[in-house]
Image: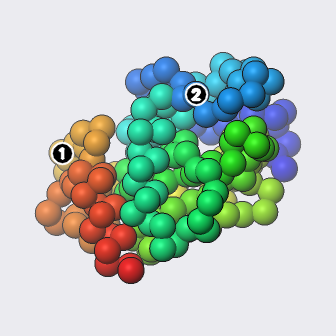
Amino acid sequence: MSDEPEISVFTHHFGRPEPAVPPGDFFADKFDKSLWRMMYDEVGAGWYRNGFLYLFGAELPGLTPILDLWAHRLTPGVERTVIGRNAYGMLLVAEQTTDEGTDAPIGLLDPAAGTYATFEGLDFASLLSDWLPQDQLPGFLDQAHYDAFRQAGGQLQPNEVLAPQMAKDGPEDVLAYHSRMAAHHT
């Protein structure tokens, strides 16, 4: 656990989103909505690290159908919603938010590797206070390739990813990328 109080460690490491967007509505329960609102007030929602990360925005649940492409890697019958992504198309996925609320486990889908993993103790609060600030999610915050792309004048549109294998060819639509990678890893 971080030495800094609660989730303020997140803003210390990542700052405020630029640009900011409205927050996602990830929870059904009023209490969990209230807790999420307090977290959101502290960390915000939108683009972080010069557009490398998109976290907690209202549009993210719209990416949830992508998870159907990965059904062969996911445990069936588990409610899931996308809560974040990086420029390489890796997705942060909350599981069972209706039942678990802010204690919902969070998984990481890595389309390049074709893997989905959950981690003991990873939920909304620990994601903000520990896992992201301490770079504990394998490969999720490694933005060296993205930084080189940006330095060369590259720019991603909100619906695009910088697919690691496609770097020479440029950006790719996020749905097309996940479709291609899910088929590759079948």
Q: Is residue 149 visible?
A: no
The residue tagged with tag 2: helix, strand or loop?
loop
Q: Which residue is mark 2?
A: 25
Which image quarter: residue 6?
A: top right
User: Percent position (x, y) of residue 71?
Assistant: 48, 67
x 33%, y 70%: residue: 181
Instruction: Give the residue type at disc 2.
Output: Asp
Q: Is residue 113 visible?
A: yes
Q: Is residue 173 left or right of residue 64?
A: left
Does 123 appear above or below 109? above
User: Percent position (x, y) of residue 43?
Assistant: 63, 28
Q: Is residue 16 left or right of residue 150?
A: right
Counting residues from the start of the chain, the first of labels 1 and 2 encountered is 2
x 24%, y 39%: residue: 157
Q: CA distance from mark 1 to mark 2?
A: 34 Å
Which image quarter: residue 23?
A: top right
Q: Are marks 1 and 2 in contact (CB under 8 Å)?
A: no
Q: Which residue is mark 1?
A: 153
x 64%, y 25%: residue: 40
The residue tagged with tag 1: helix, strand or loop?
loop
- Count residues near mark 1 (Cα–Cα under 10 Å), then give few for <14, some for 14-19, many for 20+: few
